[in-house]
């Protein structure tokens, strides 16, 4: 598949880029996509929720009534989970939700996601550009020129550029990411992937199976 390279004004240039079939034209593996997206979301969870069990609740450990002869159920201390203000039974505690996923599975998932985007015409390539200062208006104009202002977009750049990052920060449904941070979740979460020329080459190098 060949894509025409556009400039920031939305105009087609004379340059064309041929997408690597081993990355943008594979047989998609849906299960690998599921695992990698789940892996990304699991690692993003804070896991800081906590609850107090009976050993954590403040209160006396004295037995509140005699064992027999009261006509009611036997009971220990006031921190019993059955009483109001008592500890919680098997409550949540801080823990890590992340899990291990092999590099090969991640690669298969990401090239599968890129293949889906290529098949759906969800990829645009633009010339490398720089912004002299953070200008949200200039970034919005670029989206308008490319006719993707109303879509959820992901701009993939090769190196960190704070001016570009700050320009896109406050625009709804718009995100900027470095090529080496590209993942399955972000690929599928966007309607349109916008690659700058240098980032596309980096992605092809990164996911090549050589």
Image (cartoon, rainbow, N blue to C red):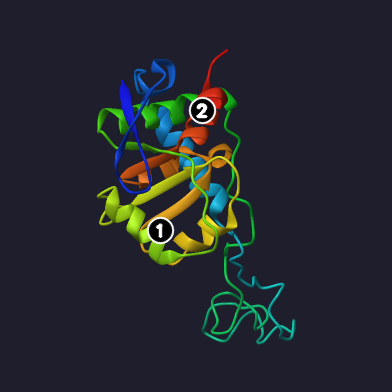
**Which one is earlier in the sequence, the residue at label 2 or at label 1?**
1
Q: Can residue 105 be seen at all in this image of the molecule?
A: no
Q: Which of 194 and 61 lies nearest the eye of the viewer?
A: 194
Name the residue at 54% across, 76% down.
Answer: 82
Q: Residue furthest right?
A: 61
Mark 2, other Cα within 10 Å: few <14 / some 14–19 / many ≥20: some
Q: Quadrant of the C terminus?
A: top right
Name the residue at 43% across, 43% down.
Answer: 185
**Residue 198 drawn above or below residue 72:** above
Q: Which of 57 and 208 lies nearest the eye of the viewer?
A: 208
What distance separates the C-alpha of mark 2 from that of mark 1? 23 Å
**Quadrant in the rendering for residue 89:** bottom right
Residue for badge 2: 201
Which element carries disc 2, helix, strand or loop? helix
Which element carries disc 1, helix, strand or loop? helix
Mark 1, other Cα within 10 Å: few <14 / some 14–19 / many ≥20: some
Location of residue 48 in the rendering, given as x and y in whole percent from the top left corner? 61, 64
**Residue 201 drawn above or below residue 79:** above
Residue for badge 1: 139
Location of residue 2 in the rendering, given as x and y in whole percent from the top left corner? 32, 22
Instruction: Say which mark, if any, is on residue 19.
Output: none
Residue 144 in the figure: left or right of residue 157: left
Name the residue at 39% across, 66% down.
Answer: 137
Location of residue 167 in the rendering, given as x and y in whole percent from the top left corner? 48, 62
Location of residue 130 in the rendering, given as x and y in whole percent from the top left corner? 52, 50
Q: Quadrant of the N terminus?
A: top left
Q: Residue furthest front?
A: 14
């Amino acid at each position: 598949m060949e894509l025409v390279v556009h400039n920031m004004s939305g105009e087609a240039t004379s340059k064309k880029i041929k997408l690597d079939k081993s990355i943008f034209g594979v047989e998609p593996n849906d299960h690998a996509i599921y695992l990698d997206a789940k892996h990304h979301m699991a690692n993003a969870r804070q896991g800081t929720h906590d609850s107090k069990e009976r050993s954590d609740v403040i209160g006396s450990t004295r037995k509140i009534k005699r064992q027999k002869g009261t006509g009611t159920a036997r009971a220990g201390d006031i921190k019993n989970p059955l009483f109001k203000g008592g500890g919680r039974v098997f409550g949540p505690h801080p823990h890590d939700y992340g899990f291990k996923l092999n590099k090969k599975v991640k690669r298969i998932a990401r090239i599968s996601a890129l293949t889906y985007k290529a098949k759906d015409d969800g990829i645009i390539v633009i010339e490398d550009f720089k912004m002299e200062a953070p200008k949200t208006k200039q970034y919005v104009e670029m989206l308008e020129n490319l006719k993707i202002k109303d879509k959820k977009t992901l701009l993939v750049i090769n190196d960190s550029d704070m001016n570009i990052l700050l320009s896109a920060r406050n625009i709804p449904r718009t995100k900027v990411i470095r090529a080496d941070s590209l993942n399955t979740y972000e690929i599928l979460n966007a309607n349109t992937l916008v690659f700058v020329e240098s980032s596309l080459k980096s992605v092809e190098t990164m996911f090549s199976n050589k």
